[in-house]
Image: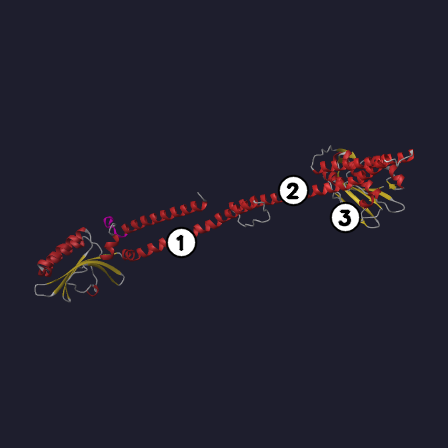
Amino acid sequence: MSIRIKLLLSYTGMLVVSLMIFGLTASLFTIASTGDIHSLKDFYKVHYQLNPLSEQEESIFLELKYLAKNDPDELQNHELLSEYDFKLKTERSGLYVRRESSTIFESYSLNQPELSEALPSYDLNNYQIRSTFNIHERFYGYAKFDFKYSDGDKGSVFVIKERSPFAEVTRRLLPILSLILIGVLIIANVLLYRSITRSVVKPLNLLRDSAKRIQEGDLQFELNLQSKNEIGQLNQAFETMRKRLQETVDIRQQYEENRKELISNISHDLRTPITSIKGFIEGIRDGVANTPEKMDKYVDIIYNKTVEMDKLVDELFLYSKLDLKQVHFTFETVDIVSFLDDCFEEMNYDMEKKGVTFKWNQRVSKRIEVVADLDKLKRVVLNVIGNALKYMDKPDPVICISLHVDSEWVTVEIKDNGMGVDPKALPHIFERFYREEPSRNLSTGGSGLGLAIARQIIEGHGGTIWMESEQGVGSSLFFTLQRSIEKEGQNSHDTNFDH
């Protein structure tokens, strides 16, 4: 059963119960007004045609009516009328008898000077013998019988009882008030049903339509509901789920594009050495290398190309593992000064070979300890310096190493005086296989993975890496490492080291 039908049945039931309660209340209200539980069944009939008398009053009225029919002159006997009036007084009623325009008898209990003017005119057919009348703000009910005396004069006998005006108001207004109340109940329930439907069913329908769109693969929409109730929270959770699905789809599409780009770049970067190897092998097979010197040269070229291919595959494999978070980091406390000394000593031969001046020629006695994975951090330094060495264009190339230390981080700066990087290309240099045109990578045929691997490793250490560059002047690459403060002791003050 749908929520809409359940709500409809609930409000219909509530309406029926409200009407039943209203009917019961009206019944009790009528009993309280009339004081007679036996008249409840004929309440509307009695009160729209006549105001009922009690059993004693009705009995007295019938006796008077009998006299009026059979011996009307007896209704001029004051003693007899006084006896009947005494009986009526016990019922809080009064007797009134008239003859033509004069009053024969009037009960002292009525005590109403304007009574004769308020009474109805003669109706010898007695079509309406019971009714009500008002004198100012006092309300009376009566039963009367019109007759003729023996001499032909018209006469009337009245049994009159003062009634509560509240009962008359009830009699007259109860049907109208009942209809108004029923109408208000119906309208209120309809409006309440509509309001609940709009606040519950409409958002649920929106969720259902959104789920269908997601099922069809459409995630380019937004659920923007401001409600803070449970439905609003459900919509918010659904919107969060949609955003995450959209992010997942975007990431998957990006991975797919990266995969295609990766295949394209691998094919491009492998094609050149493979083509070169193939050409030299064909030269050997065709006898072009017909001397030992040529043969050695061809073999050396083939070997170097194979080494380049092996290095490319190794870097690609490492980058893929880093990208998939499949590389385990083994962190330990490292003296960054001694570590950099070891790295630069290892590269010293290549630097001297290229005539590069390396400004790291003074050892520092203070230990500056960081938390790092030695092997992977060494890969970062070698990649960064190796990348800088490839693109030196000055007659006197220089690489300068600096450390900037604060209370929590050590920032390593590797600065060169190379050709610099175009500002438009600077945001993309850490992307894999990115090549500026004309770029340093293009001119040297690098793999384009060195800086991308460096970024993955530094981010795996919880640090950041970035580059500042000025074309024609040089570039500075920075990366941060977290300090091991607990083990440094007194070396926790801010310090700058330039070597």
Q: Quadrant of the N terminus?
A: top left
Residue 365 visible somewhere in the drawing: no
Q: Check if mark 2's residue and mark 1's residue have beta carbons within 8 Å.
A: no
Instruction: Please give the residue where the numbered disc 3 appears in the rendered image.
Output: 426
Front one among 436 and 154? 436
Pair 3/1: label in front: 3
Q: Secondary structure at mark 2?
A: helix
Taking the magenta stretch, the answer to whether it contains residue 375 is no
Residue type highlighted by circle 1: Ile
Instruction: Please give the residue where the numbered disc 1 appears in the rendered image.
Output: 187
Residue type highlighted by circle 3: Leu
| Residue 238: image location, x then y, percent | 56, 44
Residue 153 drawn above or below residue 409: below
| Residue 52: image location, x then y, percent | 21, 54
Residue 32 drawn above or below residue 106: above
Report crowding for label 1: few under 14, some 14 to 19, many 20 or more residues within 10 A (C-alpha): few
Q: Secondary structure at mark 1?
A: helix
Instruction: Please give the residue where the numbered disc 2 appears in the rendered image.
Output: 252
Residue type highlighted by circle 2: Arg
**Figure quadrant of residue 355:** top right
Report crowding for label 3: few under 14, some 14 to 19, many 20 or more residues within 10 A (C-alpha): some
Q: Tell whether 96 sits left or right of 469.
A: left
Q: Which residues are magenta?
A: 33-39
Q: CA distance from mark 2 to mark 1?
A: 54 Å
Dot label at residue 442:
none
Disc 2 or 3, which lies upstream in sequence? 2
Principal secondary structure, stretch drawn in magenta: helix
Front one among 325 and 269? 269
Residue at image location 70% in from the left, 42% down from the top: 260
